[in-house]
Amino acid sequence: MCVLSPSMHEPALQMKILVVDDHVLIREALRGVLKELKGSATIVEAPNSRQAMQRIEENPDLELVLLDLNLPDRSGFDVLAELRERYPSISVVVMSASDERENVARALDLGALGFIPKSAQREVMISAFNLIFAGGIYIPPEILGRHEPGARPGQAAPAPPNGRVMGSALGLTERQIEVLALMMQGKSNKKICRALDLAEPTVKIHVSAILKALKVANRTEAVIAAGALGFGPPAGRQID
């Protein structure tokens, strides 16, 4: 049986967030946004990948890393890959000046829980972080190729409480909807197995059915396609 960990959106006095960016003004801006959302959180900072790894070693209770892709001493993608391999329990969200679709897809494929453009307005960042804290994956709406009716360009659309309506419309079963929700939390097949108490071959069958229903070739495209359709993972369910 798996152990359910508290969602990031629940009050957590000990919550620690690491901001990795070489620009002081960016770190200060992010600190302000995070303190507005998580006033009790401890914000740790690092200007490069070397100090970021040092901060992680010094703070084993870190829950979230905000990672710039353009670091002075190393590629952010390489850092992301190392973080997912060495510290799988720490969530990582990418921040970048470039929001090209290829970069977004690569970051998600490497296990990021979101991709927030640095050019996003403050209210957009707040909406993005709220979605991530609720267990979802934030993808810029312009990357999804859609805008919500009445929304300003680049504005983050709120996630629906669950994806059952959308899943049913795609012909997905209740179990496949649960699998898709966990895929959107960046969970691997093994973690989905533990979460839903399923055999790995069964999960693979469900994932294949989801890819077919969404008409995509891989998990990253599935996350992007599901996000474009307004699918949101169940609020409050965060599984490690």
Image (cartoon, rainbow, N blue to C red):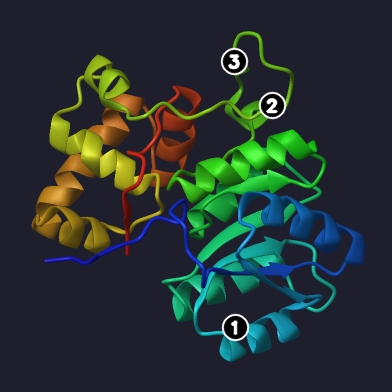
Q: Along the polypeptide, which appears first: circle 1 or circle 2? A: 1
Crowdedness near tag 3: few (<14), some (14–19) or many (≥20) residues, C-alpha within 10 Å: some
Q: Along the polypeptide, which appears first: circle 3 or circle 1? A: 1
In the displayed structure image, the side of residue 121 where residue 140 appears, left or right: left
Q: Residue at position x 35%, y 27% from top? A: 214
**Residue identifier under label 2:** 155
Q: In this view, does 51 lie above or below 131?
A: below
**Residue identifier under label 1:** 56
Q: In this view, does 17 lie above or below 210?
A: below
Amino acid bearing label 2? Gln
Q: In which quarter of the image is residue 3?
A: bottom left
* Quarter containing the N terminus: bottom left
Spatial CA span between label 3 and label 2 = 9 Å
Q: Marks 2 and 3: in contact by CB < 8 Å? A: yes
Q: In which quarter of the image is residue 179?
A: top left
7 and 77: which one is in front? 7
Q: What element carries label 1?
A: helix
**Residue identifier under label 3:** 148
Spatial CA span between label 3 and label 1 = 38 Å
Q: Marks 2 and 1: in contact by CB < 8 Å? A: no
